[in-house]
Amino acid sequence: MSFEEHKHIILECVSCGLCQSNCPIYKQTNLESNSAKGKMSILYALLQGWLDWDEVGERMYECTTCKNCEATCLSGLDIASVIEATREELVKRGYGHAVSEELAKNLREVHNPFGEDATQRERLKKLAEG
Ligand code: SF4
Ligand code: SF4
């Protein structure tokens, strides 16, 4: 589903913060903007026109999409799905994550995500087989 189809979920977040304690990224960084509550607030600001697309990517990529927040969300919001749809929209708008862009470029150009020479596959396979 598209970002457009997920807008209603962003608007349904009541900013209660019950999701924070469960979020591994929030626990790691101690930044409210990294919890589901923070991410929905950022996306709400985007919908209101207070932020632009180039300002929201960093936090959207700092999510494991583990769905832990959904276990405590009283509104039962599908946060991971919103994050994935937002990332899709970010890529469409040219704001994909630098590492993902690099992996995709390597796959397109040399058919190996790490940019390694694909012609070496057989040799490496034989080495692994001993
Ligand atoms: S899905 Fe994202 S926001 Fe929700 S708990 Fe996991 S890392 Fe945190
Ligand atoms: S628990 Fe749900 S409604 Fe409450 S802040 Fe988190 S995402 Fe929003």
Image (cartoon, rainbow, N blue to C red):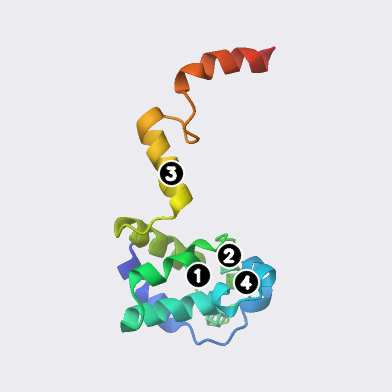
Comes first in the chain, label 2 or label 3: 2
Provide the residue designation for mark 1. 79
Q: Secondary structure at mark 3?
A: helix
Marks 4/3: CA–CA distance: 34 Å
State yes or no: Cβ of the residue under disc 3 lies below 8 Å from any atom of ligand 1.
no
In contact (CB < 8 Å): disc 2 and disc 3 = no
Three-letter amino acid code at disc 3? Glu
Comes first in the chain, label 4 or label 3: 4
Residue 39 disc label = none
Q: Nearer the viewer, residue 5 or 57?
A: 57
State yes or no: Cβ of the residue under disc 2 lies below 8 Å from any atom of ligand 1.
yes
The image quarter containing residue 72 is: bottom right
Three-letter amino acid code at disc 1? Ile
Provide the residue designation for mark 4. 71
Comes first in the chain, label 1 or label 2: 2
Comes first in the chain, label 3 or label 1: 1
The image quarter containing residue 42 is: bottom left
Q: Secondary structure at mark 2?
A: loop
Three-letter amino acid code at disc 4? Ala
Provide the residue designation for mark 2. 67
State yes or no: Cβ of the residue under disc 1 lies below 8 Å from any atom of ligand 1.
yes
Q: Tell me: residue 52, above or below residue 87.
A: below
Residue in the image at 50% along x and 68% along y: 59
Q: Indicate which label's residue lies in the foreground, 2 or 3.
A: 3
Q: Secondary structure at mark 4?
A: helix
